[in-house]
Image: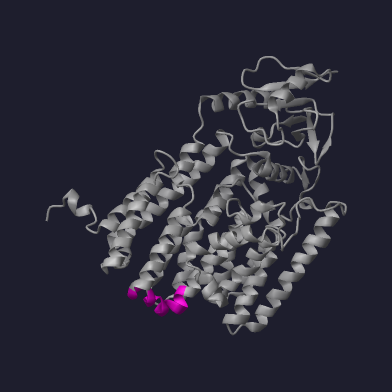
Amino acid sequence: MKLSISSLIPQNAATLWLGITLILWWLGIAGRDIYLLPAIVFLGICIFQIRKGEFSNNSINWINDYSNKRCLIAFYWIHVGLYLLTTILKYYSFRWNIWDVGSYSNMLFNISQGRFYSSYLGSHNWADHFTPSLSPLSLFYSLAPSTHWLTLAKTIAYLSVPLLIYKICRESFQNKEQAWSVTVILGAAWMLFYAPALNSLYYEFQPSALAPPFILYAFLCFQRKQWLRFWLTMFVLLGFKEHLGAVWIGFGCFMVLATPNKKMGFILISGGIISIYLIMFQVMPYFRNYEESWSMALGPFQDIPKKLIYLFKILIPLGFLPLIFWRFGIMAGPAIGINLLSSHMRPEMYSTSYHYDDIPATLLILAMILIISSSRHKFKFWQEGKASHWLLAGWMVCVLGLLPSSPMRELYAAIPDKSHWDIRKELVDFDQLSKENSIAVQTSLGPQFNRTNILAITQDSNGNCAPMRRGISVLETEYLVFAKSLNHYLIENLEQCLKKMMKSSDYESLPGYNHLNIYKKTD
């Protein structure tokens, strides 16, 4: 039979407009939110069909068709390539900054030189965050120092999650087709649609971003009763950041409430609480000479409306199922609770727009696997009656309204232009010139350097710029490096800063650079 173009077009109008919506969103053309126009048409058709009693949930049997499986696998690998390419290009378009890519890259470079020291913070690596499990990446810096090792490690960790989802589904479902279907649905959510997870990928870097595959692998070992591997992985998790004991507590609560492994559950709960206390209130303070915490701001009863909105945004894409089936969803509770403990001084922790949901999102996806595998017979509700159809339509409105930036839009934004390449060339030349000197740089330039004698530039209330070490300006630095066209976090008024530098008797402008402003300390 001859294949025609019309045979590829869905006959159902709602399906057609949903397809147009998702294609426009994925392509990201004509603006970030243009996809909402066909989405409105799609929802209008759904409402009309529900009122007429003509609405029907589309079967997902097509997912298990052999040729469609191959297409879905190919689609996954296409996105692997897209995300890896975007990660690399962000470096050359100066999308990474000292906080947080440059600072961690500097730590790994210093470890490769035999020093557990942060040049930017002027302290031990563990004074700000507890990150021993990050240290093995320094082996790559010993081979060839490059910020790419850090950013690609984060992206690869994220991209490995769908593969582990499939492994866990194979252990959770007796039927291979059901395991594959759930993998596709949750894998697509992780790779494309679930904003709390995607935004943690799009953010620069935090050590906890490497934890998701370890969390899933630990649970896989629990399913398979591979206890040595389970405990080793759980201990490795503690070294990705000081709050990762929340994973121990979450796993423990799940085991106590939903499995026969109650003794192990209580051990994990106790171990998680003890580890968080020891790391946050004993180990880290020791490495910062018992100074006040730089990043801890508690206020569990502050900003309650925004925290409720946060809970809505993190749960609605999952249909509130982790809350409804709370014995499974409880494993994400402690990780979410840590975000909710934050004060109104750190609203980004409960915004779903930064990196703070890397751990909660992973645990919620894991909970979804367990919910679907143990309670799938209860989901027949969605196939019966108008009430369920209205709820489904409302859920679609929320999901479409909360879609993150698409992979293609992230790729477009990461492509460097000519000025980026020109700046990069001048930075390479300057790096060779100043290899033995101490420098301070504008925050967007920090990830471009791999050296120990480097600081960030900050601006004081009088408009003066100087090297910074946690709020204490130092003047021993021999070069200050700026790029006017790039982001200048910590420098509120770059023009004023540069004017002050030109008038300064401590520094003189270094000639020969068209895209950089470099000032050398006078003798």
Image-quadrant location for residue 446? top right
Residue 374 sits inside the magenta stretch: yes
Q: Residue at x 64, y 83 (%)?
A: 262
Q: Main secondary structure of the magenta part?
A: helix
Does the magenta portion include 415? no
Query: Image point 51% across, 57% down: which residue?
Result: 160
Farthest-out residue, bottom: 260
How many marks overall? 0
Q: Is 197 situated above or below 523? A: below
Scheme of colours in the image = one colour
Outermost residue, left side: 1
Q: Position of residue 365 (x, y in %)?
A: 52, 65
Q: Which residue reaches farthest front?
A: 51
Task: Judge from the rendering whether residue 156 lies leftward or rightward of residue 70; answer left or right.
Answer: right
Considering the image in quadrants, where does the N terminus appear? bottom left
Give the magenta-colored segment's residue range: 372-385
Which is nearer the eye, 245 or 231? 245
Corner quadrant of residue 310:
bottom right
Is 443 situated left or right of 380 in this image? right
Q: Is residue 50 left or right of residue 262?
A: left
Can I make out residue 207 in this image?
no
Q: Position of residue 398 (x, y in %)?
A: 46, 59
Residue 183 visible from this viewpoint: yes
What residue lies at 69% left-to-right and 45% top-to-bottom? Answer: 104
Residue 515: give x, y in percent of width and height: 62, 21
Find residue 66 and report its horizontal and vertical position in percent: 29, 63
